[in-house]
Image (spheres, rainbow, N blue to C red):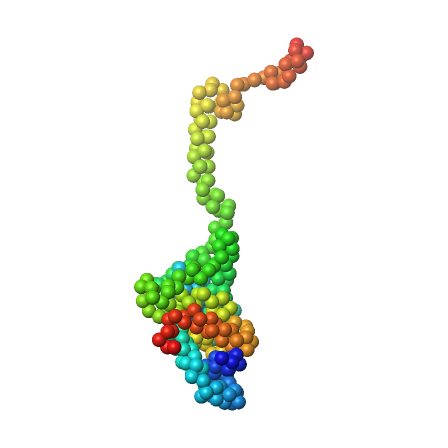
Amino acid sequence: MTDDQLIQASREGDEQAFKELIRRYESRVASTVIGMLGNCTEAEDVGQETFIRFYNNLKNFRGDASVGTYLTRIAINLSLNELKRRKRKSLIFFRKLSDDDFDIPDENSNTGFDDNKELVQQAIQKLEPKFRSVLVLRLMDGYSTAETAEILKLPIGTVLSRLARAQEKLKHILSPYLGDLK
Amino acid sequence: MNKKIRELLYRSFEDDLTPSEQQRLDRALAESEELRAEKHRIAAMRSMISESSDKTFHPFFAEKVLRQIREQSRPAESFFDSLIEVFRPVAIAVTILFIVLLSYNLFKSDSKSLASAFAEPEIKLEQALDPTLAWVME
């Protein structure tokens, strides 16, 4: 069945059709949300909320954007809201987020990461949300710069400059681990 | 490293350079070993980032979403519905107790009146009025 057929069936109350849509797009939403928030409980909650919002808005979904792009837009907005909530929470408790919050071990430490994946995910969490969102959409989710600009409702020039700055910052954070590439 | 060249280097990964910009970058790359190393590092980092994305949530993700959708589509109980639910057993118990007490009072009393059901002493109208008035009437 095509996405349109599944959406039509879901609108008519077919639960299995909506389940199939979730199965199809879980990986895309997971990639966005986990990229933005890290692999944590909140990420799964935001992922669930993304599909619930989609379900509640099925009647309004006109198909101007693809289902994947539509879901990614919801996921990124909810992730940014979650990051704002975290920031507010840290302000309430008079606690400033510092580099230590992300626990990137030094390059010689044995208590470090088993693989590059975890290391990169932790490093991405150190970026400001506006840089992180561009990086996640473009490099992790594989959207083009034009699609990234459309999802974030930003000019392409802004996306390109944020992407360059995000990579600069990330390269600086990861520089001890990119040693063998120097 | 020249800031403009660095910007061109990053943009080159996005296929966003004009022919003249591409030419300028190629020339800079040919001249600078440091720039070539930088390009190599950026490419490696981009590859690490794209390989690092997690593509799944915990098992039964779809089922969890559907369960939440089912829960939200159930009609929400109003505050008063909840109150009724909580106090209904109490109200029934109090009513039964009330009826038992009324029956007991009626059974014990000689006269079968409403006052006796409520175990009130039977008083005359004059007694109920002000004692002074009762005295004046005498």
Q: Is residue A70 visible?
A: no
All told, the count of numbered labels is 0
Residue B69 found in image quarter = bottom left
Is A117 left or right of A168, judged from the image as shown? left
In this view, the residue in front, A139 or B23, is: B23
Judge whether B99 appears above or below B3 on screen. above
Q: Residue at x 49, y 66 (%)?
A: A128
Q: In this orientation, which residue lies closer to the viewer: A149 or A130?
A: A130
Vertical arrangement, residue B15 with respect to residue B76, above or below = below
Q: Position of residue A19 (x, y in %)?
A: 39, 67
Q: Quadrant of residue B96?
A: top left
Q: Residue at x 38, y 73 (%)?
A: A178
The residue sitting at 33% across, 64% down in the picture is A109
User: Which of B64 and A27 lies nearest the eye of the viewer?
Assistant: A27
- The single residue placed furthest to the right in the displayed view is B136
Which residue lies most toward the top here? B138
- Relative placement, left or right, of A179 versus A132 is left
For residue A2, side relative to residue A77 (left or right): left
Quarter the C terminus of chain B occupies? top right
Q: Position of residue A44 (x, y in %)?
A: 40, 62
Residue B13 visible? The answer is: yes
Residue nearer the viewer, B123 or B50: B50
Q: Residue at x 31, y 64 (%)?
A: A110
Looking at the image, residue A182 sits to the left or right of residue A163; the answer is left
Picture coordinates of residue A151, whole percent (x, y): 51, 73
**Where is residue B127 shown, x and y percent of the image?**
60, 16
